[in-house]
Image (cartoon, rainbow, N blue to C red):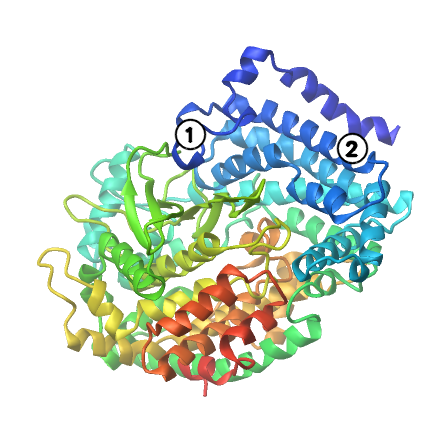
Amino acid sequence: MKKHVLLLPLIAILMISSCTKSQKDANPFFTEYSTPFQVPPFDKIDTTQFLPAFVEGIKQHDAEIAAIVDDKAEPTFGNTILPFDKSGKMLRRVSKVFFNLTEANTNDELQSIANKVSPLLSKHSDDISMNARLFERIKTIYDKRKDSKLDAQQIRVVEKYFRDFQRQGANLNKEQQDQLRKINEDLSMLSLKFGNNLLAETNKNFKLVIDKKADLDGLPEGAITAASEAAEKDSLAGKWLFTLAKPSMIPFLQYAKNRELREKIYRGYFMRGNNGNANDNKTVLTDIVKLRAEKAKLLGFDNYAAYIIDDNMAKTPATVDAFLNKLMVAALPVAKAELSEMQKIAVSEGAKFKLQSWDWWFYAEKLRKQKYDLDENELKPYFSLENVRNGMFAVAGKLYGITFSKVTNLPVYQKDVETYEVKEADGSHLGILYLDYFPRESKSGGAWCTDFQSAGWENDKKVDPVVSIVCNFTPPTGDMPALLNWDETSTLFHEFGHGLHGLFTLGKYNRTAGNVPQDYVELPSQVMENWAGAPEVLKMYAKHYKTGEVIPDKLITKIVNSGLFNQGFETVEYLAASILDLDYHKLAVPATVEPMAFEKESMTKAGLFDEILPRYRSTYFAHIFSGGYAAGYYVYIWAAVLDADAFDYFRQSGDIFNPELAAKFRKNCLAESGDDEGMTQYIKFRGQEPSLDPLLKRRGLK
């Protein structure tokens, strides 16, 4: 009976989605793209085409797997591993477009399709990873891998696939595999629900509407204009609208003098998913935690954190615990000192209250002005989006010799998206870069880098990458261009680092090309942030949007001197979220929690004090409950050790654009990053393991 329950949805969808020949011919996913550089033909894609394409993609992939397992010849790399590595091409093609759109430009139809497709994909993935005949062929090759005249990369691919199958349940008995299938299907749907709930809570369920001009006191003109334009678009002409999108919320928290309204918008933010409404995420995340613990136990691990981290550089949760606790011990006193300084400012201004979490941004901005004579509004005119973008392109050019040329003949999924052709120093084509900058209701919050086509090889020919960077930056207002704050500037450089990793990736096999441990992933991105704030780089791109004046030395000095500003807060709120993530995923069966009580206990144990909330509270912790960072949010600061050490290496050389080091970094840490273990690749570049000291010094924790 259970078997029929699993098959019925697929049968129903196959009936609904069966295509005539003319429908197949009209569906762009059924053939190779005919667009320039083979980018997705967004102008020809209709929402109704996704479901038939998914069904056909699964069908084709199943046929490819069947051809491998039905081969009567003795299993070899050439007849098993290689065709498996290259299989599923159509399914990848439609998946990359569909799931990128559900994050960047979603709608009710796409969300409905996602609800139908997610269990199908979960079942399809399990059908492959639990295919006993396929696993037996891979195991045969694995057992003989050292005696089969395979090269080092082929051996690595074989070992990776063998380990994948083990980790995905290939060694379980039939009853256990059925249990794992059900867990995986349920998790896929719960993750989707968590993300959809959060999208609604962020973009639809909260609005701060102001109708008294006095309540705008303290806000910079740009923030007021943006709020006015937002209100007008929302049929609230003559009022001001602030939302939970960070370009709207953060300036309000930084500058609005009305403390009651600061509390209101911040509460709207930190109560997302915890409002007892249809979008409440408490039960959703409780079920996710429970199922992940059960999955880990099935696969032979003590808990889900052990299962995840076993595949990372850190290897064990205990290693991560020790690492995070060491940093928290260093960061907490710094954050408390920052709070003390801000409380003194508040008292000196006549405040009769103890600072709360919604006061932090407001008084931190005052502290920045007092200690460093720096107001972020002084900086923003020098950081127009155009200048920052051109600056990061220039940095990549000086480091790696690549160039970026805007192209306007490529189809895009939303009118504001920009596209660039990326070329090597010799003029040869490297890849395509999409840039999607501004918030909209159809877009998830945050910033990320993804791709529509990964770099790779097919039929002995290189496949060029199509990379996409998606952000939620301060949009232009009136006749003023988009002026970025420092956090947004750093974020663009950060995501661009991920983009370079995707553009530079080399490797003949999908399983290893660019495929790195999760706690290595943020090295390519975070290292680019170091260049963003280097004085010599600021002079390259930080130019006043009206006059073209290069940022003056006195402002650069203020930026450098304020480099340690608020580092206690930023480190503690991040570490708190990382610890909360691990605590959820260190739970063993039975993992039953009441989220808010669990969060409170976790944060108390970590030493967090009331004036700072974890960067992500449980009910809107998308990284771990609807993204790919479960038991892995720590990876940003793990990789920060690598990035600080790497940039220090450039600094020590006397040239932050040292061509020899740039070539070594590109080769070992970007292009060939998947060729060996993460630390091995880093040591190939650095010559030694990284030191913690550069990170501690950069954050003022030593």
Label 1 sits on residue: 42
Measuring 55% from the left and 35% from the top, which residue is drawn there?
Answer: 93
Tag shown at residue 66: 2
Measuring 21% from the left and 66% from the top, which residue is drawn there?
Answer: 540
Q: Quadrant of the C terminus?
A: bottom left
Residue 575 visible to the viewer: no
- Amino acid bearing label 1: Phe
Whether 337 is drawn above or below 95: the answer is below
Dot 1 lies on which element? Answer: helix
Tag shown at residue 179: none
Q: Calculate the distance from the C-alpha at mark 1 to the C-alpha at mark 2.
A: 32 Å
Measuring 50% from the left and 55% from the top, which residue is drawn there?
Answer: 505
Q: Quadrant of residue 555?
A: bottom left
Whether 440 is drawn above or below 265: the answer is above
Residue 99 rendering spot, x and y as whole percentages: 53, 39
**Few, some or many residues within 10 Å of mark 1 (<14, 14–19, 20+):** some
Q: Quadrant of residue 307?
A: bottom right
Residue 77 visible to the viewer: yes
Whether 608 is drawn above or below 227: the answer is below
- Residue at far bottom of view: 702
- Amino acid bearing label 2: Ala
**Few, some or many residues within 10 Å of mark 2 (<14, 14–19, 20+):** some
- Residue at far left of view: 547
Q: Is residue 690 left or right of residue 65?
A: left
Residue 256 rendering spot, x and y as whole percentages: 27, 60
Residue 179 versus residue 49: which sits nearer the camera?
Answer: 49
- Residue at far front of view: 149
Q: Is residue 230 left or right of residue 400?
A: left
Residue 121 rendering spot, x and y as whole percentages: 68, 36
Dot 2 lies on which element? Answer: helix
Residue 171 rendering spot, x and y as whole percentages: 86, 51
Residue 530 versus residue 93: which sits nearer the camera?
Answer: 93
